[in-house]
Image (cartoon, grey):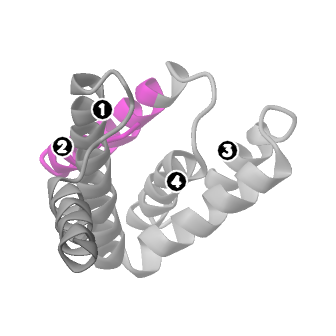
Amino acid sequence: MISEKDLAELENIPFDERIKRVEKLLEAKESPRGFELGLLLALKMGQEIREKKPLGSESGDLVASWNGKYSEYLIEEAIASAKEFMLHPGAIAEKIKAGMKKFDEKDKSSEADALDPSGLRHDVAGQDNAVQKDTESEDENG
């Protein structure tokens, strides 16, 4: 997965080098996500704009090369992601941060699960309430 750290590093690298790094990251992946392919597509489109080339003159070839290699759904997702990168780069950055936060929280909960091999994560407050209810029932019956 391309992380927030990877994206931050990309900002400090010349544009042509950014494209090469993303391509290298994607080459190492068996099944990239649409978001990751979209990042590459957006960079290619940005390069076309910077070089005053017609939009799609090179990025269109990139998308065409994905046919047969990736599913139609993944290609459509990549195109939609590239569009988001081009139109709303700030919103994408926020999504990445939110995604990384969820990923970190998931890792932390997985670590907690590893500490409880029984798979029964106990809620101490819930146990206290259950004990309190049992005690109240005994007092009423008793």
SS for callout 3: helix
Residue 128, image x, y percentages: 15, 60
Q: Which of marks 1 and 2 is nearer the N terminus?
A: 2
> On residue 5, which mark appears?
2
Q: Quadrant of residue 73?
A: bottom right
Q: Distance between the residues labelled 3 and 2?
A: 25 Å
Residue at left offset 27%, top offset 52%: 100
Q: Distance between the residues labelled 3 and 1?
A: 43 Å
3 vs 1, front mark:
1
SS for callout 4: helix
- The residues colored magenta run 1-25
> On residue 62, which mark appears?
3
Q: Is residue 21 magenta?
A: yes
Front residue of 3 and 40: 3
Q: Earlier in the sequence, mark 3 or mark 1?
A: 3
Can residue 54 be seen here? The reply is no
Q: Which amino acid does label 4 sit on?
A: Phe
